[in-house]
Image (cartoon, helix red, strand yellow):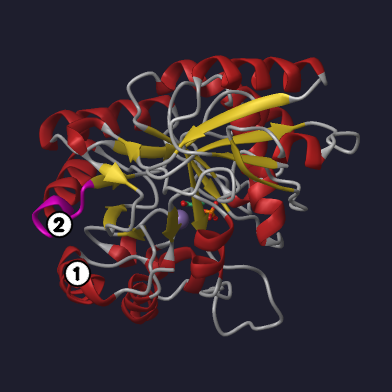
Amino acid sequence: MIVILKNNPEERQLENLIQWLKSLNLDVHISVGAAHMILGLIGDTSSVDIDLIRALDIVEDVKRIQEPYKNANRKFHPDDTVVELSGGVQIGGGKLQLIAGPCSVESLEQICYVARKVKESGATVLRGGAFKPRTSPYAFQGLGGQGIDLLLEAKQETGLPVVTELMNITQLPLFDQIDVIQIGARNMQNFELLKELGHAGKPILLKRGLANTLEELLMSAEYIMANGNEQVMLCERGIRTFETATRNTLDISAVPLLKQMSHLPVIVDPSHATGIAKLVKPMAMAAAACGADGLIIEVHNDPPHALSDGKQSLTPEAFEDVSAAVRSIAPFAFHW
Ligand code: PEP
Ligand code: MN
C-alpha cells in the first residue's frame, strides 16, 4: 500500500501517522519525490483501514498495490534511482552509459590496453571477470584474486570505475576497492548471497537469470534492497528459449517494461544475449533506442585468442563503431 501525502505535510501530523503505521507492524519506506512525499507500507496491510488514512488532512491519496516487490517498485519511488560511482559517473536517470571490457581479466597488459581503448571510445566503466562461472569445470576459471588486483591496476591507470562478478560471499573482502559487484545470471536466485549483499555497501549489477521472469528479477533485487542496499542496477542479458541460432534471446521489451515497473537503472548486455560479435551492434542500438540506462559490452584485444567468450567479444575498433552508433541514437530514445 502507498500513501501519497499533500505538499508540505505538517510535521507533527506526519510523525503521528508514521508512528501509528509502525504500531500496526508495518515498515514505512519514505520517498521524497519532486512533487510529493510518498510512504510505502511494507508488511501485512490487509487490516489497514484505507478510508481512515485517506481522511487525514495531510493525505492526498492511498492506493493498494498488488506487486510483491515494494522497494524496487516505481509506484513507491516515482523518480529514477541514480547510482553514483567514482569519478562522477552516474547510472540511471535515462543517460546512456557504456560499460566495456573483456569477459575475463587475462593479464596486466591485456586489461590495461583494453581499458585505455574503451575509455578513448567513450566507455565510463570498465568490466572484467576475475571469478568466472563457467559451464565446464575444465574451462578457464578466471584469475581469481590476482584478476581483481590487475583490474584495480587498470582502474588506477585509467580512472575508470570497475565492475566484476562475485560468486561467493567469502570473496567479498577482495572487493573492497571494486566499484560495482556483478551478480551473474546463475546466481540471480542465490537468496542467501543476495541477503548478504544488502550489507555490502556497494552498488550491485544484478543480471537476469537464464530462465527468470521480470517479476522474479525484481524480487531478487528486493532481497538486496530489503536488507539495506538500495543501489541496485538490473541487467537484461538474454534468456533461454527454443532458439539456438543465438546464445540466448534478447528480451528487448524487458527494457521499457522494467523501467515502468521499477525505478532502478536498466542495463542491457548484448554480448551474452547474442553470443555473436556481429549482433552486438544492432542489439546495442535497439537497447539504446528503447531507453536503456547503460550497455555492458565485452571487448577484447584479440578475440580469437580470448580465454573466454571470444566469439561474442568486439575488437576495440568495433567497440568504437558501436559506441558512436548508440550515442547518436540516445537523444531519440524512448522514455515513458
Ligand atoms: C559475464 O558477464 O561475464 C557473465 C558470465 O554474464 P552472465 O552471468 O550474464 O552469463
Ligand atoms: Mn562473458
**Amino acid under label 1?**
Arg
Query: Is disc 1 in contact with disc 2, using a CB cutoff of under 8 Å?
Result: yes
The residue that mark 1 highlights is 327
The answer to whether one can see residue 226 in this image is: yes
Quadrant location, the C terminus = bottom left
Residue farthest to the right? 47
> Is 111 on the left or on the right of 41, as rendered?
left
Q: Please state the horizontal and vertical placement of residue 330, each as a whole percent of the image.
A: 24, 70
Residue 118 lies in quadrant: bottom left
Taking the spot 19% from the left edge, 69% from the top edge, the residue there is 327
Dot 1: few (<14), some (14–19), or many (≥20) neighbours within 10 Å? some
The residue that mark 2 highlights is 122
Of residues 247 and 282, the one drawn nearer to the viewer in this rendering: 282
Residue 62 lies in quadrant: top right
Taking the spot 31% from the left edge, 35% from the top edge, the residue there is 84
**Amino acid under label 2?**
Gly
120 in magenta = yes
Residue farthest to the left? 120
72 in magenta = no
Quadrant location, the N terminus = top right
Q: Please state the horizontal and vertical placement of residue 51, each as a whole percent of the image.
A: 79, 42
Q: Quadrant of ligand 2?
A: bottom left
Q: Please state the horizontal and vertical placement of residue 85, each as a whole percent of the image.
A: 29, 34
Of residues 9 and 165, the one drawn nearer to the viewer in this rendering: 9
Q: Which residues are magenta?
A: 118-124
Query: Helix, strand or loop at disc 2?
Result: loop
> Is 265 on the left or on the right of 2, as rendered?
left
Give me the C-alpha separation between circle 1 and circle 2.
9 Å
As drawn, 231 above or below 335: above
The answer to whether one can see residue 190 in this image is: no
